[in-house]
Image (spheres, helix red, strand yellow):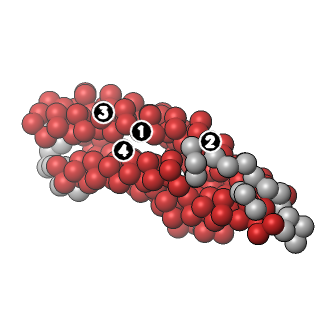
Amino acid sequence: MEDRSRHTFDTWPTDLLIDYAIKIHHRGIRTRGPLTLELLGRVKAERPLVLSQVEQLFAASLEALDAHLFKEENVLFPYIEELHEAASNRQAAAPMHCGTVLNPIHVMMADHAEELQRQATIAALLDDYNEPEGCSDDYKRLMHELHEFALDLQEHTHIENDLIFPQAVEMESKWVNGCNGGNCCG
């Protein structure tokens, strides 16, 4: 597990936070998620009732996250990067095509809440990822992978909900339709 304490995300600029979210979290979900789902299928026989439920929940999570990541990468993040560029250059930014950046942000935050709840359900079903006595090495690896996935999703949610999104709202209020109160030069 990566030592997340070494990162002080609150000091990072918006564009770096977006790069980190895409390159670490989005890529991690897309690469590790299917491998974890495959591992789940292989060890399901060790606890069929519980692991079948977990498999359904985790598969639903991956499907929902795929759509979520697509929206972030193709709609929300490009606009936030435009806002960041405008703010960096102290220039006016165009309004978002869907009204305000808050509209897609609310959707993304609702997605985050739903996925965190789904991960909490998985953790509860698995007794907080505790390994039953006598389980296989693959089962132990599965518990580790599922726990890591949940922790990464929590970090992803924190970076976006608590840092990127508020910064985007602030930049939009300053640089769209008024260019920082009409004063782009200082």
On residue 65, which mark appears? Answer: 1
Q: CA distance from mark 1 to mark 2?
A: 23 Å
Of marks 3 and 1, the one in the foreground: 1
Residue position for label 2: 97
The answer to the question of whether label 1 and label 2 lie on touching residues, with beta carbons closer than 8 A, is no
Residue position for label 4: 145
The residue located at (67%, 49%) in the rendering is: 95
For label 2, the SS is loop
Residue 173, horizontal then vertical, whole percent: 66, 64
Of marks 4 and 2, the one in the foreground: 2
Of marks 4 and 3, the one in the foreground: 3
> 10 Å neighbourhood of mark 3: few (<14), some, or many (≥20)?
some
Residue position for label 3: 59
Ranked by sequence position, the earlier of labels 3 and 1 is: 3
Ranked by sequence position, the earlier of labels 4 and 2 is: 2
Q: Nearer the viewer, residue 29 or 160?
A: 160
**Residue 152, visible in the rendered structure:** no
Q: CA distance from mark 4 to mark 3?
A: 14 Å
Ranked by sequence position, the earlier of labels 1 and 4 is: 1
Q: CA distance from mark 3 to mark 1?
A: 10 Å
The residue located at (19%, 54%) in the rendering is: 124
